[in-house]
Amino acid sequence: MLISLSNAASFLKEKDNFTIITHAHPDGDTLGSGIGLCLALRALGKKANVINDEEIPPKFRYLEIEPQEFEEETVVAVDIADVTLMGKGIRAKYESGVDLSIDHHGSNKLFAKMNYIDASAAAAAQIVYELIGLLGVEITPQIADRLYTGISTDTGCFRYANVTPDTHRVAAKLMECGADAAKINVRMFETKTRTYAALERLALDSMQFFYDGKCALITITRDMFAQSGSDENECDGIAAISRQIEGVLVGVTMRERRDGTYKASVRSHDPVNASAICAKLGGGGHPNAAGCQLPGTREEATKLLIDTIGEFI
């Protein structure tokens, strides 16, 4: 069932003992919006925790807060378009048990009992900002840092096509509330570990071009992780690289999973719709940023993905 944001606020005011679910391979938006909402609920005198199926990447550890002890009553999902994105452990427990979903993906599968979806929002954190206002909670610097992180990371530091005037207005208000925007942006966009730098070099060496240079593909293998000392937590920055090359309409990063299958991150420029490409392969996302899982060997996964992209170029 789709509901309004005011309905979502009323529901949160009525309930207590919240578990807030964030998606697997957590990024700044799912963590920032989830933890920001958690802090707001605690400010109302409620009990709330945020959970993820995996360890939080080191660069996001400043977002973490201490857990509380209580018996769970209400389950909220943030920035999750489909139960397949929860991670195996969380999905096994909560696939049919989410009370409220708050999301900004137009491809959301409406898996929760109640769903608030705003595909015009640049980030889930932008929605949570408005929701906190309806809850009547003051946005502290602690909350502001988390929501700003969500918006900044999901917009590529306000460079992507999903940015609207409202996105800038919300970011400005968060800065007025105490968000340390400069420090956050340096940490997110101008700081690289040595292991990431080594992985990026190997990834760039793997780049292939298709369709007269309109599609660029980077493939990251388990061997590259071993050579660089990096891991899947450091792949986010690589996803956008191939789209930055002049003439490329679709930039793709294929990442080998531990089970030998591949996950594809697709980034596109208009008029190519990345979400439509990934939807044909069982995934989804935004018009210019989406993802999907790919079966088979590296060669089979590459052919399936490139053939599908060819239908859109």
Image: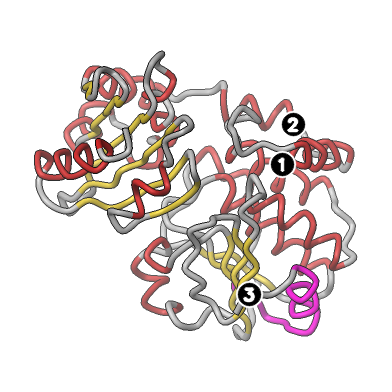
Q: Which mark is residue 2?
A: 3
| Structural distance between the alpha carbons of marks 1 and 3 | 26 Å
Q: Earlier in the sequence, mark 1 or mark 3?
A: 3
> Residue under circle 2?
181
| x, y percent for residue 247 | 38, 16
- For the C terminus, the quadrant is top left
Q: Which mark is residue 71?
A: none
Q: Indicate how the structure is coloured in the image.
A: secondary structure
User: From the viewer's perspective, is 62 left or right of 192?
Assistant: right
Element assignment for label 3: loop
Kindly identify the residue that appears in the image at 36 percent across and 26 percent down: 195
- In the image, residue 8 lies in the stretch drawn in magenta: yes
Magenta span main SS:
helix
Give, as a three-letter code, the residue at label 3: Leu
The residue mark sitting in front, 1 or 3, is: 3
| x, y percent for residue 84 | 37, 65
> Residue under circle 1?
148
Give, as a three-letter code, the residue at label 1: Tyr
Question: Mark 3 and 2 residues: CB-CB less than 8 Å, in contact?
Answer: no
The residue mark sitting in front, 3 or 2, is: 3
User: From the viewer's perspective, is 149 left or right of 171?
Assistant: left
**Where are the magenta residues, as a range?**
5-19
Kindly identify the residue that appears in the image at 78 percent across and 62 percent down: 131
Element assignment for label 2: helix
| Structural distance between the alpha carbons of marks 1 and 2 | 7 Å
Above or below 162: residue 25 = below
- In the image, residue 14 lies in the stretch drawn in magenta: yes
